Amino acid sequence: DNVERSDTISIRLHAAMLEMAGIPYTGPDPIGAARLGDRLALMTMLERARVPVPAHALITSPNSLPSVAFPCAVRPRFE
C-alpha cells in the first residue's frame, strides 16, 4: 500500500491546473513534481544519469531490513 501525503498530491494537482490554464508559476511541472515526490524513482533516475546519490534501499517489510552503515537516514518513499 503506497500512501502519499495529501500535500504532495496537492502540489502536483495545482501545478497541472495552472499549466492547463496557461497561468505562469514557479516550481516543477506536473511530471517533475510527480518524479520528485517518489524518492525511489528520483534516486533511480539520478543514478541512470550518473549523478552520485547516497546508498539506498526499499524496505518492504520489517523482516527484510538491509544491512546498513551508520550514520544513516530512514525516509518515507513518498513525500
Image (tube, helix red, strand yellow):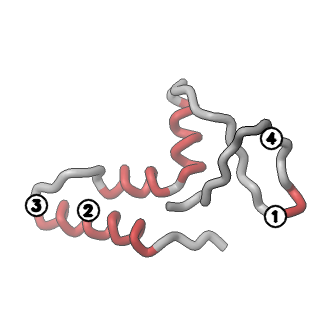
Q: Nearer the viewer, mark 1 or mark 3?
A: 1
Q: Nearer the viewer, mark 2 or mark 4?
A: 4
The residue that disc 2 covers is 15
Q: Are marks 1 and 3 in contact (CB under 8 Å)?
A: no
Q: Which mark is residue 42?
A: none
Q: Nearer the viewer, mark 2 or mark 3?
A: 2
Q: Amino acid at mark 3?
A: Gly
Gap in angstroms between the C-alphas marked 2 and 3:
10 Å
Residue 15: image location, x then y, percent = 26, 62
Gap in angstroms between the C-alphas marked 4 and 1:
16 Å
The residue that disc 1 covers is 61
In the displayed structure image, the side of residue 36 where residue 55 appears, left or right: right
Indicate the secondary structure of the residue bearing disc 2.
helix
Mark 1 or mark 3, which has the lower sequence index?
Answer: 3
Gap in angstroms between the C-alphas marked 1 and 3:
43 Å
Q: Which mark is residue 22?
A: 3
Few, some or many C-alpha atoms within 10 Å of disc 1 (few <14, some 14-19, many ≥20)?
few
**Residue beneath the point at 86% across and 56% down:** 64
The residue that disc 4 covers is 68
Mark 2 or mark 3, which has the lower sequence index?
Answer: 2
* Residue at the far right in the pictured view: 63
Q: Amino acid at mark 1?
A: Ser
Q: Amino acid at mark 2?
A: Ala
